[in-house]
Image (cartoon, rainbow, N blue to C red):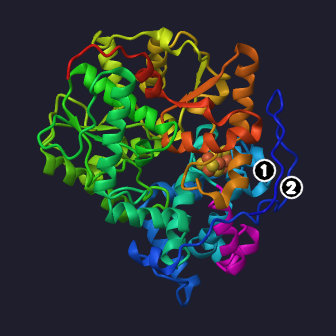
């Protein structure tokens, strides 16, 4: 890993003077043949890879009208150039969204437009060659697919879609990323990203039940594979052991307990995350989504609820029915699927939970909107529910809450810096630098209101902030799970 200097926090965000190629060295480890082949890709660079890559690109643009429109419609207005956290944090102009797109667009123009075929120098068309592939591998793994740039583009061009297509093409020629592809393989064979087998999961949950009872004196259950429970909870596997995720899981269990809801986890679908999204692979995304359907059918549940995970909620909310539906065997009186925040918010609205806000009086909170929740999904049946519901829950369980500056939250939220399959130690420099805009916004409310903690509803955000907060002079435990706050405040007075 290259040595690097952590950027300095400034009182107001500044657009950095460009430094050409300064992040060209940043590349994640490559997947080995075993990781590749396990999920259906060639183990190593295929013969005639240039032709295979160009043909795959043709297949993708013919299948996706959106991708073709994104490639054809950019007018180089420049509105997106200063909107990417990776550009703001690294100063590398290839991290400007339009420049990142052009790494892909230049090949599309060369092979799939008339002008590019005959006058390539006139339209910025390039041959697919080794130099370009190196740039693709580097800079398409410097996009967290957060979609912030698309909010500010007058044409709504979504760089995330282009970055997913580039990764899909690279996988098809045998150049995959280790972190994502290894994890997808584990989730497809064992059921979760960590490779945690059923017995270990059961032991972990029993240990957590004992911890809760020791602390509260109340026997709160964490059921696994319990047939005919009403609710199947699908949650990121980080919730089973990592801090601060596990405190969120304890919060969900307390909510279910106190509301008298019957629920279970599943060892077959013990992972909400779906990294198939990050590599643009419909097949892998579908394989993972089908495990949720299989678990729901096997256990005979009536509802599916997703725990705190940003991209998992996007896949669940936007694609689950297409990938693994229809879910007509579930209770249609509830959204299919439902977010844990919707469940908790609904219970709060109906006065079904007794809450003691003072339990969180040692914290002054702010809230980090996760990209995939903010810009890729919704919650509840009101416009903007994905912004309103988490904030209303925090206000119901905490006395002190302040939002970060308005251009850094909700639709305009800045990525944590570790999303989109980049949450790996081989990309630490990128992750730290990409977190700069969020850290600057956090610093503002720390200085102005004395904010001590930031809540989030995404497993990746929580892991990323735990790692990068200390680089900026904060403490790693200043990031908390939203349901950790709920779990602190909930008064347990129901018998099991
Ligand atoms: S999707 Fe996000 S990470 Fe990717 S180019 Fe746009 S702003 Fe940057
Ligand atoms: S904002 Fe949209 S149209 Fe303008 S340069 Fe960026 S991608 Fe192209």
Quick one: SS at disc 1? helix
Residue topped by disc 1: 90
Q: Residue at x 68, y 23 (%)?
A: 405
Q: Position of residue 57 (x, y in %)?
A: 51, 71
Q: Who's the residue at 31% across and 19% down the image?
A: 346
Residue 125 x/y as whole percent:
69, 71
Q: Is residue 27 above or below residue 321?
A: below
Above or below, comparing residue 116 to residue 306 in the picture: below
Q: Is residue 127 magenta?
A: yes
Q: How many marks?
A: 2
Is 475 placed left or right of 311 in the picture? right
The answer to which of 74 and 378 lies nearer the viewer is: 378
Viewer-closest of 101 and 428: 428
**x and y, in percent, of residue 437 in the image:** 72, 37
Q: Which residues are magenta?
A: 118-142
Q: Which mark is residue 19?
A: 2
Q: Is 493 situated left or right of 14 in this image?
A: left
Which residue is at the far bottom? 47
Task: Identify the residue shown where x is 86% and y is 55%.
Answer: 19
Q: Is residue 303 magenta?
A: no
Which numbered disc, 1 or 2, marks the residue that appears first in the sequence?
2
Number of residues whose C-alpha sits closer than 10 Å to that of mark 1, classed few (under 14), some (14–19) or many (20 or more): many
Foreground pick, 326 / 122 = 326
């Amino acid at each position: 890993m290259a040595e690097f200097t952590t950027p300095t926090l400034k009182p107001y965000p500044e657009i950095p003077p460009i430094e050409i190629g300064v992040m060209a060295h940043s590349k994640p480890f490559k997947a080995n043949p075993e990781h590749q082949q396990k999920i259906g890709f060639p183990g190593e660079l295929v013969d005639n890879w240039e032709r295979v890559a160009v043909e795959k690109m043709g297949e993708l643009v013919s299948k996706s009208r959106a991708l073709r429109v994104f490639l054809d419609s950019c007018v180089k207005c420049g509105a997106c150039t200063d909107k990417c956290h990776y550009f703001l944090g690294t100063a590398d102009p290839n991290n400007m969204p339009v420049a990142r797109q052009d790494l892909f667009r230049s090949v599309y123009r060369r092979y799939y437009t008339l002008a590019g075929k005959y006058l390539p120098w006139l339209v910025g068309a390039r041959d697919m060659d080794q130099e370009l592939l190196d740039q693709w591998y580097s800079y398409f793994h410097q996009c967290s697919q957060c979609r912030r740039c698309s909010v500010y583009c007058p044409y709504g061009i979504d760089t995330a879609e282009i970055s997913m297509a580039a990764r899909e093409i690279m996988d098809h020629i045998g150049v995959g990323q280790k972190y994502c592809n290894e994890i997808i393989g584990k989730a497809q064979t064992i059921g979760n990203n960590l490779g945690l087998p059923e017995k270990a999961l059961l032991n972990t949950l029993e240990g957590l039940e004992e911890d809760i009872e020791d602390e509260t004196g109340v026997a709160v259950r964490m059921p696994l594979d319990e047939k005919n429970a009403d609710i199947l909870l699908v949650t990121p596997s980080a919730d089973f052991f990592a801090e601060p995720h596990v405190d969120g899981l304890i919060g969900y269990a307390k909510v279910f307990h106190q509301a008298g809801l019957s629920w279970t986890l599943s060892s077959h679908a013990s992972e909400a995350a779906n990294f198939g999204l990050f590599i643009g692979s419909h097949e892998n995304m579908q394989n993972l989504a089908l495990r949720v359907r299989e678990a729901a059918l096997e256990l005979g549940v009536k509802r599916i609820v997703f725990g705190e995970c940003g991209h998992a909620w996007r896949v669940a909310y936007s694609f689950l029915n297409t990938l693994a539906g229809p879910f007509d065997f579930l209770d249609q009186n509830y959204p299919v699927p439902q977010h844990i925040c919707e469940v908790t918010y609904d219970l709060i609205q109906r006065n079904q939970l007794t809450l003691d806000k003072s339990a969180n009086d040692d914290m002054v909170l702010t809230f980090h909107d996760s990209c995939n929740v903010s810009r890729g999904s919704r919650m509840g049946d009101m416009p903007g529910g994905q912004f309103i519901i988490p904030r209303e829950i925090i206000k119901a369980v905490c006395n002190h809450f302040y939002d970060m500056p308005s251009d850094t939250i909700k639709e305009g939220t800045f990525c944590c810096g570790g999303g989109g399959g980049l949450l790996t130690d081989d990309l630490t420099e990128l992750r730290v630098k990409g977190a700069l805009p969020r850290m600057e916004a956090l610093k503002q409310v720390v200085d102005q209101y004395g904010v001590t903690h930031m809540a989030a509803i995404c497993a990746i955000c929580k892991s990323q902030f735990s790692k990068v907060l200390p680089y900026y002079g904060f403490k790693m435990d200043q990031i908390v799970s939203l349901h950790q706050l709920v779990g602190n405040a909930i008064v347990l007075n129901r018998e099991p």
